[in-house]
Amino acid sequence: MRVSNKLKKVSDRIVIPLAKLLVKLKVSPDVVTLFGGIATGLVSVLFLAQGEWLLGGILLFFVTSLDMVDGAMARILDRKSNWGAFLDSVTDRISDGLIMGSLVYYFYSIENALLMVLMIWALISAEVTSYARARAESLGFDGKVGIAERPERLAFLVWGPILIGLGLTWVMPVMVWGLMIVSSITVLQRIIYVKRQASSQK
C-alpha cells in the first residue's frame, strides 16, 4: 500500500499540473479522453504492430497517462458525470482492443502462432473482465474483484515493449503469457464472486 501511495504521489505531481493547464486553456475533459483514445490507436498501429518496441512503449506510456489527466480535469471542474464516465469506459475498451490487436498482428506477421493465439485470448479476457463487472453491477451485484484491472494490464502492455526495445527479448513471451494468465484469472474471480452473491440471495 505504501508503494502504491508513493507512485500515486509521483503521478499526481505530473498529472495535476497538466490537468490545471488544460483547464486554464479551456480544454474539455471529453476532448482529452477522445484524443487519448485516438493517440493510443495511432501509436499501437504505427509502432507496436510494426515491432517498434521502445518508441512504441514510451509513446504508449504518455498517451495512456491521459486517462488520468481527464479524470483530474473533471475533478478540478467539479464535472463528474455519467456521460464522462461512460465515454471514458468506452474509449478505454477501444484503446485496449487496439493495443492488443496490434500485438496480435505483429505476432501474425512474424509467424509466431503461439504468441498470436495467447494474445487473442488475452484480448478476449481483458474485454470480458470489463464486461463482467458492468453486467454484474447492472444486475445489482458487486463485480469489482480480481488481480488485474486496467492499470495492471497496461503495466504489461507498456513496460513489456519498453523492456523488449531495450534488448530484453525474453520479456516478450513473459509479457504475453503473464497478460493472458492474469486476465483469465480475473474473469474467473469475477464469475465466482458474482455466483456467490447470487447464491446468498436464494
Image (cartoon, rainbow, N blue to C red):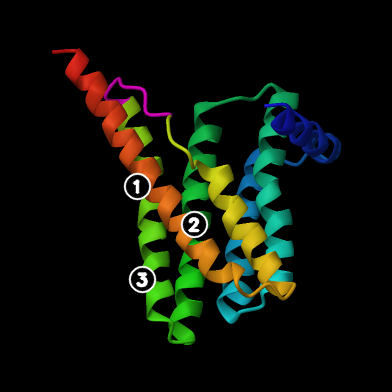
- Using the image as rendered, state which of residue 162 and residue 98 is in the foreground: 162
Q: Quadrant of residue 157?
A: bottom right
Residue at horizontal 83%, vertical 41%?
14
Specify which label sits upstream in the sequence, 3 or 2. 3
Distance from disc 3 to disc 1, alpha carbons, whole Å, reads 17 Å
Magenta stretch prevailing secondary structure: loop
Circles 1 and 2: CB distance less than 8 Å? Answer: no
Residue at horizontal 74%, vertical 55%?
62
Query: Which three-letter amino acid code belongs to the residue tagged 2?
Result: Gly
Q: Is 67 colored magenta in this rendering? A: no
The correct choice, above or below, for 154 with respect to 120 in the image is above
The x and y percentages for residue 23 are: 80, 35
Q: Quadrant of residue 70?
A: top right
Looking at the image, is mark 1 or mark 2 nearer the viewer? 2
- In-image side of 161 versus 119 (left or right): right
The disc label shown at residue 128, or none:
1
Looking at the image, is mark 3 or mark 2 nearer the viewer? 2
Residue at horizontal 53%, vertical 33%?
85
Tag count in the figure? 3
The disc label shown at residue 171, or none:
none
Query: Which three-letter amino acid code belongs to the residue tagged 3?
Result: Val
**In the rendered structure, which segment of residues is drawn in magenta?**
138-144
Q: Which residue is mark 3?
A: 117
The answer to whether residue 39 is visible is no
Q: Residue furthest left?
A: 202
Circles 3 and 2: CB distance less than 8 Å? Answer: no
Instruction: Look at the image and tell me in which quarter the C terminus lies.
Output: top left
Query: Which three-letter amino acid code belongs to the residue tagged 1?
Result: Val
- In-image side of 119 versus 137 (left or right): right
